[in-house]
């Protein structure tokens, strides 16, 4: 095992999930995919607290907005028994407790996936933390790449000379151009 539940890092979780996905893909035709439940336990320990807060907040926003401010207290009350909490909520409100979170997540990150929410939830029953981890990893990487691309394009634009042969006005250029005039006025 790469790590214990207490000392696991995000890199170790990533390695475990990659090996888990590889094992499932390598199975022979007709065999059930191999699921590494130890990896699931570690993923749960690493991301559960953050995910449960987001999941409960989304659930309350959808079903009982007055309770959004009680998320921390509710999770503290059910510490170690979060599954009981989410089962009670699903029974009371008649909806999978993860569905509001996944709906919000796909609305923001990939609206084309909205039609597959029920199938996705069915695939990850009892393993919602793994779903959360995989989605946040996937879409965070895409957003980071898009942000890097945007920043690179912006930097290139700022470095290009304007059509009149002058540089674009950047804070540094403005300071460079106005500082001599400011200093001469102060004399």
Image: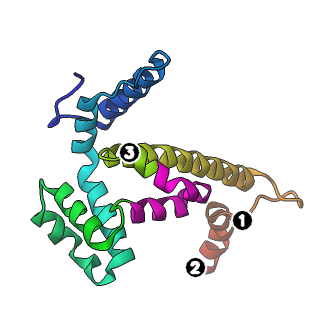
6 to 103, vertically: above or below: above
Circle 3 residue: 124
Label 3 Cα neighbours within 10 Å, binned few <14 / some 14-19 / many ≥20: few
From mark 3 to mark 1, how far is it between C-alphas?
52 Å
Relative to 158, is 74 on the left or the right? Answer: left
Secondary structure state at the residue bearing disc 1: loop
Chief SS of the magenta region: helix
User: Residue 9 placed where, x, y %?
Assistant: 26, 35
Label 2 Cα neighbours within 10 Å, binned few <14 / some 14-19 / many ≥20: few
The residue located at (68%, 55%) in the rendering is 154
Circle 2 residue: 186
Relative to 1, is 25 on the left or the right? Answer: right
Secondary structure state at the residue bearing disc 2: helix
User: Residue 137 placed where, x, y %?
Assistant: 44, 44
Q: Nearer the viewer, residue 2 or 80?
A: 80
Label whose residue precedes the other's in the sequence (3 or 1): 3
Viewer-nearest of labels 3 and 1? 3
User: Residue 66 placed where, x, y %?
Assistant: 29, 84
Q: Nearer the viewer, residue 40 or 163?
A: 40
Circle 1 residue: 169
34 to 99, vertically: above or below: above
The residue located at (62%, 66%) in the rendering is 175
The residue located at (35%, 77%) in the rendering is 63
Viewer-nearest of labels 1 and 2? 1
Secondary structure state at the residue bearing disc 3: loop
Q: Nearer the viewer, residue 33 or 71?
A: 33
The residue located at (56%, 46%) in the rendering is 142
The answer to whether mark 3 and mark 2 are in CB contact below 8 A is no
* Numbered-mark total: 3
From mark 1 to mark 2, how far is it between C-alphas?
24 Å
Magenta run includes residue 133: no
Magenta-drawn segment = 99-119
């Amino acid at each position: 095992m790469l790590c214990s539940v207490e000392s696991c890092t995000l890199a170790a979780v990533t390695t475990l999930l990659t090996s888990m996905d590889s094992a499932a893909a390598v199975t022979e035709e007709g065999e059930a995919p191999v699921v590494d439940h130890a990896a699931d336990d570690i993923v749960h320990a690493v991301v559960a607290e953050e995910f449960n807060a987001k999941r409960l907040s989304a659930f309350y926003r959808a079903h009982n907005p007055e309770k959004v401010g009680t998320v921390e207290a509710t999770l503290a009350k059910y510490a170690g028994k979060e599954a009981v909490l989410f089962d009670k909520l699903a029974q009371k409100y008649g909806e999978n407790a993860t569905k509001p979170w996944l709906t919000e997540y796909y609305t923001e990150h990939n609206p084309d996936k909205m039609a597959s929410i029920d199938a996705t939830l069915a695939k990850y029953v009892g393993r919602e933390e793994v779903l959360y981890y995989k989605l946040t990893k996937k879409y965070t990487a895409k957003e980071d790449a898009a942000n890097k691309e945007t920043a690179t394009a912006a930097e290139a634009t700022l470095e290009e000379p304007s059509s009149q042969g002058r540089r674009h006005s950047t804070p540094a250029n403005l300071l460079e151009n106005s500082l001599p005039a400011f200093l001469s006025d102060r004399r």
